[in-house]
Amino acid sequence: MQLAMIQDKLIPMEELDPVYLDRGIFFGDGVYEVVRSYDGKVFALQEHLERFANSLAAIRITNVDIGRIRAQVEKAFATAAIADAKIYFHITRGSGPRDHAFSADLQPNFFLTVTELPDDTEDKTKGVALSTHPDLRWKRCDIKSLNLLPNVLARQDAADKGCAEAILVNESGFITEGSHSAFFAVFGHPPDKEKGVWGPLKQALQTAPLNANVLPSITRKYVIKAGEEIGLDIVEESLTPQQVRHADELFIAVTTRDIVPVVKFDDAVIGDGTPGAQTKLLARRFHEFTK
Amino acid sequence: MQLAMIQDKLIPMEELDPVYLDRGIFFGDGVYEVVRSYDGKVFALQEHLERFANSLAAIRITNVDIGRIRAQVEKAFATAAIADAKIYFHITRGSGPRDHAFSADLQPNFFLTVTELPDDTEDKTKGVALSTHPDLRWKRCDIKSLNLLPNVLARQDAADKGCAEAILVNESGFITEGSHSAFFAVFGHPPDKEKGVWGPLKQALQTAPLNANVLPSITRKYVIKAGEEIGLDIVEESLTPQQVRHADELFIAVTTRDIVPVVKFDDAVIGDGTPGAQTKLLARRFHEFTK
């Protein structure tokens, strides 16, 4: 008799809830998105749905109607009636007997949650500390997949060190991104005539370029837009931890928290140890987009 | 109101079955094993449990009693009463609100299935075809984790090409292993006085060395033992696809199927296009271990 066991309980296979045979749990065979609302308005839903469609296509889940996903997200958000909400959703390839290869007739599983966003005023006011961790992830991090164990292990390593995020460093010694955020540095002191500092006249906002090892972050896109609008040079070039230690300002950017200033990077204090001026300007500009 | 949505159905968060909040599905935050029985006897359970313990420790799941896992496997196998069974089991870190970082008080989730092994006599008699695929996996494939999306995509690519397995090739051009199997080559023609072939006197069994990018396969270990016993030189050195095309024999090795001869590798026919002599000897020897 074919059977399953859940904790200590034996169950005949034919009575098993298909949720236990979800390819999401067997293989991480699915993709996800996280969107958020600001004051009752979902931010950048269209961009998130487009990225979701790209992720689905990249892992060859072809039978999903994105219009229907949009309707489900909107229905759940309306029902929850949470002004500042985090909306998480994933689709897996479906449930079935465990086999790496998949048949085209699997029915995808959709799952979504709407929850309250935790208050992070203190982190945003004081800034957070980051630590570095080897980037052990797979080679298609441009796909927002459910294969996140290396992210989990890196993030926990940071938590153990009292840090808010792990910044991932690849085998060549370059920073890719955070375990669950994009990562930015501001370089170049602005002119200050009183102190006799005349140049450079322009500061630069730097982050890693998009490639197969970096998620095309929606928040990253809006941060760059904000940077352009406040007059920063945008530099999409990889950084090393050594360069970053000498940055004027650092911050991370992620949907659920938008821009979070960074005041410590491993053992290096960044700037004067408080959130940087450009970071504050960027955060203010970013909030304009969310209205 | 915090809520969840499963397919089209809205559910208040407090009524949601914790199985939907399993970190296994959110992150692939768990590890697994597959063991099999031959004629009513589970093969190499102790080795599989030791590897499982290593995987758990590597991802910092520390509150699992391996003795209890052994008892659960044995109970399920006895109840199923399937002589030639496949036993799959995984443990995830537990269920809870989605957060990359984890608390130590999460209660792990255990899941197991016992199913009939499909008959693969034809594959073993005729041999199978393999195709190559880039190795896109993470950098700790020595951990048998639930992050298997690159394996799924590679295996499906092979299936699309009519092949039984995808052989993974890393960025340096070397084969690591199969998407769900170990990979072996036999080199060096045996002496054949009638044909005037006098050397080399010994054939070599070659497979990639164990490192962070290769699973410490239990079947691999027993194949090597079998190879030593039938007088093959054992060479643990990485192979390139180009070298492999000129091998005398190829085979894959995996718990559920032990040794499966390979007669085609991408577009190259291996040997005379039928299972090799050493492969057959190894399979026979392997079966002695399972009794």
Image: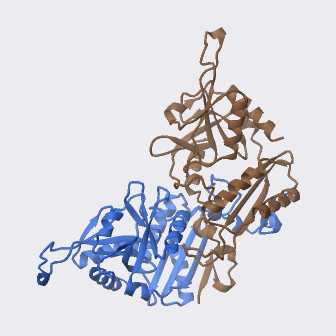
Chain colours: A blue, B brown
Judge whether A49 appears above or below B174 on screen. below
Q: Name the quarter where the C terminus of chain B is drawn.
A: top right
**Residue A109 position within the rendered picture, expressed as x and y whole percent measured from the top left:** 62, 68
- Image position of A243 with respect to B269: above or below: below
Q: Quadrant of residue A238?
A: bottom left
The residue depicted at 60 percent of the width and 46 percent of the height is B159
Would residue A195 appear left or right of A173 to someone viewing this image? left
Q: Residue A55: x and y, percent?
A: 49, 63
Give the vertical position of A2 relative to A66 (above or below).
Answer: above
B9 relative position to A206: left or right: right
Q: Nearer the viewer, residue A147 or B223?
A: B223
Q: Position of residue B92 (x, y in %)?
A: 66, 67
Q: Quadrant of residue B143?
A: bottom right
**Which x, y percent locates residue B123?**
71, 37
Residue for point 41% across, 76% down: A129
Towards the viewer: B131 or B208: B208
Name the foreground residue: A109 vs A264.
Answer: A264
Q: Is residue B279 visible?
A: yes
Residue B167 is at least partly visible in this image? no
For the N terminus of chain B, give its image quadrant.
bottom right
Q: Who's the residue at 66% across and 67% down the image?
A: B62
Image mark count: 0
